[in-house]
Amino acid sequence: MKKTLALATAATFGTFLSFSASHAASLGYPEKEELKFGFIKLTDMAPLAVAYEKGYFEDEGLYVTLEAQANWKVLLDRVIDGQLDGAHMLAGQPLGATIGYGTKADIITAFSMDLNGNGITVSNDVWAEMKKNIPHENGKPVHPIKADALKPVIEKYRGEGKPFNMGMVFPVSTHNYELRYWLAAGGIHPGYYAPHKGDTSGQLSADALLSVTPPPQMPATLEAGTIYGYCVGEPWNQQAVFKGIGVPVVTDYEIWKNNPEKVFGVSRSWAEENPNTHIRVVKAMIRAAHWLDANNNANRPEAVKILSKPSYVGADYDVIANSMTGTFEYEKGDKREVPDFNVFFRYNATYPYYSDAIWYLTQMRRWGQISDAKPDSWYMDIAKKVYRPDIYKQAVTALIDEGQMSASDFPDLSKESGFRAPQKHFIDNIVYDGRQPNAYLDKFAIGLKSQDKL
């Protein structure tokens, strides 16, 4: 049974007394004060939990309920039909909905929730085979581990007539695209989608068969032998280590350094009806993200304590702390410093970059979810329709004007183009420039080129 977090109504009157007239005048009162937000039980929902627990929503005159959802589809559907005012979402969800892949709906985001935070885990048996193909130093595997080490294992399984099944959390999830990227960089074909032919399995021409498994069910599904590996967010990679059933072999930080992960999504109609409320929500979450990364992650132990509550992530403190406090454990006992495994504010993590949106669209095109060739201008148009830095800038301006945060905490938003500089830190060393999506697609050996159609 889900547990729901709700602010006590007895606090309402007192909060409004502290909700000063000058504060309201600078932005305007919220159109809607009682809100319900959804999330999935993952550590990267932390900005929502912190904004609630530290009173940042209250500071904005908002009375928030946070509610865990069964899976990503249910979460999206409830945002679309209005049961939820907004939600912790996969970065690909607002984009997929907008272009009509799966459920068609207009969803926008004005807040990026985090960078990094995922890993790829394989079963103990697969790891034992992979290790033979990995160089070692001082008795430990050399990282990052590339999928080249997995390729002969998959070939062996296929030779024995066993399909190599792997799990990811949703067809338009970061995890799907990161797993596909890692596999393809190692010469393993992860399969195509062909929606124009009625095939949405994503397994056409596949060497490894990827399918959906909800995040909290990943370890049990691996242990049962239904899948041989998976890509998921924390704490479900570390859970495999603690249970002794699998080994995380690579983090998404190693696949694409400082990659965008989750966003906070709302329906376009909700945003248009509640502009002041929306800005206030973004303000509260920016403050929460800042708190999470402040003083070199000094607040992370307190954050882990919050997240370990059953109503949030509900995993053991030690499991969550394994990654949230700047370390990551691969093979049992092989714990390494990864201070940026979870990033919530550093590196402009909260800004909704158009180039982030366009990267996801290129991967949808690369694997066939977008069936037809599109001009570069189309990618830009969709990014601008979904990602809303204009709303983000209003929230930042208000935070600075009120003295809640300093201008030095942010880049100069008046000069911000919405595009990160070309990014070089991918596991295959291919450079990504968000201004040239079709040229980017043409660089890959595996996957659809810009003009291809299945």
Image (cartoon, helix red, strand yellow):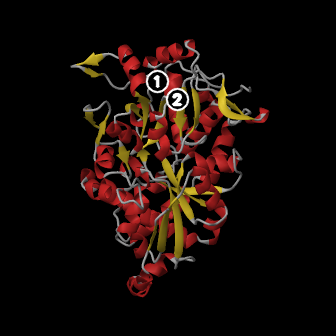
Q: Tell me where residue 255 sits by quadrant.
A: top left
* Amino acid, disc 2: Tyr
* Side (left or right) of 78 relative to 419: right
Q: Tell me where residue 18 sits by quadrant.
A: bottom left
* Amino acid, disc 1: Asp
Q: Position of residue 174 (x, y in %)?
A: 52, 41
Q: Image point 71% across, 25% down: which residue? A: 452
In this rendering, is residue 445 above or below 326?
above
- Nearer-the-camera pick, 260 or 304: 304
Residue denoted by label 1:
428
- Nearer-the-camera pick, 264 or 129: 129
Q: Image point 39% across, 45% down: which residue? A: 235
> Mark 1, residues whose alpha carbon is within 10 Å: few (<14), some, or many (≥20)?
some
Q: Quadrant of the C terminus?
A: top right
**Foreground: disc 2 or disc 1:** 2
In this rendering, is residue 354 above or below 187?
below
Q: Image point 58% across, 26% down: which residue? A: 190
Q: Position of residue 67 (x, y in %)?
A: 50, 63
Q: Which residue, as the protein is rendered here, is positioned at the far right? A: 197
What secondary structure is marked by label 1?
A: loop
Q: Is residue 117 visible?
A: no
Q: Position of residue 163 (x, y in %)?
A: 58, 22
Question: Do the CB atoms of the residues marked 2 and 1 lie less than 8 Å apart?
Answer: yes
Q: Tell me where residue 191 sits by quadrant.
A: top right
Residue denoted by label 2:
181
- Nearer-the-camera pick, 216 or 408: 216
